[in-house]
Amino acid sequence: MQPEPDVLTDHTDIICSTSIERIVTGRDAALVRIGQLIQQLNTISQLTTGIGGGNAPDWAMKQGHRYDCWLMEKPEKALPMITRNIDRSLWRDLMLRSGMLSLMDAQARTQWYQNLEDGDLPAISEANILSTFEQLHQSKAGVFERGIINVFKGLSWDYKTNSPCFFGKKIIINNLVTHNRWGYSLTWGFRRDQLADLERMLFLLDGKAIPDNRGDVSINLMNHIRDNPGKDVYEDTYFSIRYFQKGTAHLTFKHPELVDKMNDIIAKHYPRMLATHR
C-alpha cells in the first residue's frame, strides 16, 4: 500500500515523519547480514557439492523455476547489486513520503523514475538523503510552477478558446477520447497525463490533499465513459468535460479563483506576453 505523502508545501521539515537515522542504520545492518548469509550459502554449497549433492542453485530452487538469484552469486558480485536494489526501493519510498512527486508533472516524474531504474542516484546515507531532499525542498516552488507551465504549453493553439497568453474559463484538449461503433473510450498517453497533471495542480492550489492516482480525474473519467455510454459530459469538483466523437474535449473550470492563481504563475514566467491580456 502506498504510504501517505508528507507534502513539502507549507512545511519546513525536509522529510516529515521520517527517521533518516533509522533508515540508514537499518539499511546498513541488513546489508551486513545479507553478506553473512551469502557467505554461509557459499560454505554450505561447497559442502553439498563435495559430497555429490549439487550446489545451492541445484537444491535451493524449485524444479522448473531456476531463476537467477543474487544470494547464489559470489559476494563481490552479489552485494553491489543487492545494495543498488535496496537503495532504489528506499529512494522510491522516501520520494513518496516527501510529497515531491505530487508537485511534479508527468514528464518530471518519468525522468525521476528513469533515474531510479538506471541507478542514477547516490547511495543511501544520512548525508546523501539530507543533501538530496534539501535541494528538492529549495526547488519545490520551481518544480510546481514548471508543472503548470508545461500543462499550459501543451495546449493546442488551433482553437480560439485556448489563449496562448493565459488559461481561460474553458480549454479544448485534442485526442483525449476516441469513438467507434461501441462508443467512447479514453485514450492513453500524453493527453491523459496532461489532464491528471492539471487536476493535481488545482488540488494543490486549493490546499487539498491530492487523490491517489487510482482515483484521479483520468480514472474517474474513464469509469464514467464506461458506465455511461450514452452520455458525453463528465462533471466533478473542478471540471465539466464535454467530449466529442472527433476526439476533442471541452473542459470548463468550475473554480475561477484557482484559474486566476494559475494565470498568476504564467504571468510570472511570461510577463510581457500577458501584460496586455489581464
Image: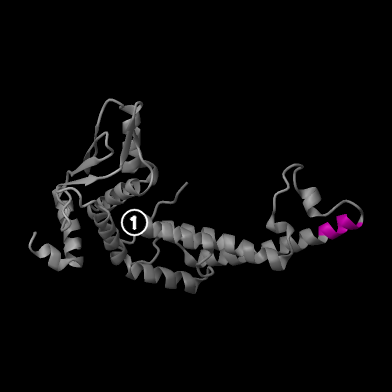
Q: Residues within 10 Å of mark 1 (few under 14, many from 20)?
A: many
Where residue 142 sits, quadrant-wise, is bottom left
188 to the left or right of 47: left
In which quadrant is the C terminus drawn? Answer: bottom left
Q: Measuring from the top left, give residue 229's x and y in whole percent.
A: 31, 26
Q: Which residues are magenta?
A: 44-50
Q: Which residue is mark 1?
A: 105
Residue 183: in magenta span = no
Tell me the SS state at disc 1.
Answer: loop
Which amino acid is tagged 1? Asp
**What residue do we see at 82% from left, 54% from top?**
55
Where residue 261 sits, quadrant-wise, is bottom left
Residue in the foreground of this view, choosing between 266 and 40? 266
**What residue do we see at 14% from left, 64% from top?**
273
Q: Measuring from the top left, give residue 43's x and y in whole percent.
A: 82, 61
42 to the left or right of 188: right
**What residue do we see at 82% from left, 58% from top?**
44
Q: Measuring from the top left, give residue 233's x and y in whole percent.
A: 23, 33
